[in-house]
Image (cartoon, rainbow, N blue to C red):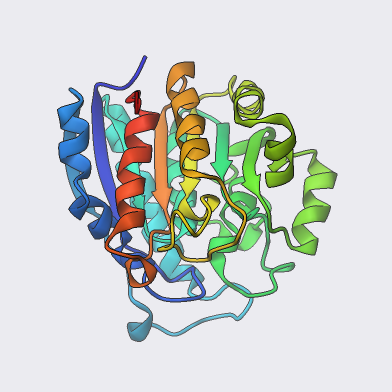
């Protein structure tokens, strides 16, 4: 069943990214009419504001293998608290990013009831660790951390690991680093590349992916807007050519809604600095609506 009550939680964080701007993502998505769109579909909406997040100019970088790690994990701890509280109040959490490192908070909050599964829609794997990262950007590590593979990320208030490898599915991937490829093979993580989608089609891939992620305490869907082709979604943190089309990404989230298994949703990496007339934020609004059961036709 589609949700009837959605709690919006903003995480205006860009410390995990390689270029600035995604901290403005939550505001851009709200400005694009998120609450009105959902309320117009009969969904009760409660906007719980933004969690506190540091800005780079006020903090030291820290270790080059995981820059701004302490500050990022502080913010993720606050996200975890808000997600857990929303679920406790019978609201479905919708977390707006910010860079994708905030998913550590979303998943930690959901894991209060035990480990679960995640459908990760992304151009990238986000499976690097401080030992394998080529950049030191933590937004390339949250899924590895959620799997318990980043021991230095352990903090009070964060439940890591939060998911098991057999309940993880990545869809839309078209950029994996060498360490990520090794990890995928080692753990048997399901990765559906853009080539798989071209060959098999969106519907069978999403149906199969959802079958994989169910069975735990929760099902989380984490949408990095760079999963969409940059011609359709130009305002993202780390664009990669050859992504999903407008209709493909909508179909993916419509299938999520039809499955009726969604417990929480992230929409992250909207970067207004690189957007055109808030196009990407507007798409983010429509994708959230699709995930909650609204259809174009």
Numbered-mark total: 0
Q: Quadrant of residue 120?
A: top right
Front residue of 70 and 186: 186
The answer to whether 138 is drawn above or below residue 249 in the figure is below
Q: Position of residue 59 (x, y in %)?
A: 38, 82
Is 198 positioned to the left or the right of 99 in the image?
A: right
162 vs 258, nearest the viewer? 258
Above or below, comparing residue 242 to residue 136 in the picture: above
Residue at 75% x, 56% y: name it.
180
Residue found 80% across the figure and 63% down from its top: 178
Q: Name the residue furthest top.
A: 1
Q: Residue at coordinates 79% horizontally, 54% vertically from top-left?
A: 181
Residue 126 image point, x, y percent: 62, 56
Image quadrant in which the C terminus is located: top left
- Whole-percent x and y of residue 295? 35, 25
Location of residue 202 by image quarter: top right
Quarter containing the N terminus: top left
The answer to which quarter of the image holds residue 163 is top right
Can residue 190 be seen here? The reply is: no
Q: Nearer the viewer, residue 184 or 123?
A: 123
Q: Can residue 146 be seen at all in this image of the molecule? A: yes
Does 98 sit above or below residue 297?
A: below
Q: Is residue 256 left or right of residue 7?
A: right
């Amino acid at each position: 069943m589609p949700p009837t009550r959605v709690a919006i939680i903003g995480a205006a964080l860009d410390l995990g990214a390689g270029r600035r701007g995604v901290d403005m993502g939550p505001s851009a998505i709200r400005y694009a009419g998120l609450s009105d769109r959902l309320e117009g579909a009969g969904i009760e909406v409660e906007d719980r504001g933004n969690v506190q997040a540091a800005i780079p100019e006020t903090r030291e970088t820290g270790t080059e293998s995981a820059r701004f790690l302490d500050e990022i994990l502080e913010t993720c701890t606050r996200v975890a608290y808000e997600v857990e509280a929303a679920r406790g109040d019978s609201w479905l959490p919708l977390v707006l990013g910010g860079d994708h490192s905030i998913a550590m908070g979303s998943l930690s909050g959901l894991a209060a009831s035990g480990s679960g599964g995640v459908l990760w829609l992304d151009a990238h794997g986000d499976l690097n660790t401080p030992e394998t990262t080529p950049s030191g950007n933590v937004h390339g590590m949250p899924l590895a951390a959620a799997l318990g593979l980043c021991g230095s990320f352990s903090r009070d208030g964060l439940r890591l690991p939060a998911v098991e490898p057999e309940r993880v599915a990545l869809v839309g991937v078209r950029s994996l680093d060498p360490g990520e490829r090794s990890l995928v093979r080692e753990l048997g993580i399901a990765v559906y590349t853009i080539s798989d989608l071209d060959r098999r089609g969106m519907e069978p891939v999403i149906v199969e992916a959802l079958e994989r992620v169910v069975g735990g305490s929760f099902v989380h869907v984490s949408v990095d807007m760079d999963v969409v082709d940059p011609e359709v979604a130009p305002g993202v943190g780390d664009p990669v050519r050859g992504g999903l089309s407008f209709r493909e990404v909508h179909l993916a989230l419509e299938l999520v809604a039809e499955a009726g298994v969604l417990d929480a949703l992230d929409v992250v990496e909207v970067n207004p600095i690189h957007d055109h007339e808030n196009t990407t934020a507007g798409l983010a609004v429509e994708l959230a609506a699709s995930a909650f059961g609204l259809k174009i036709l």
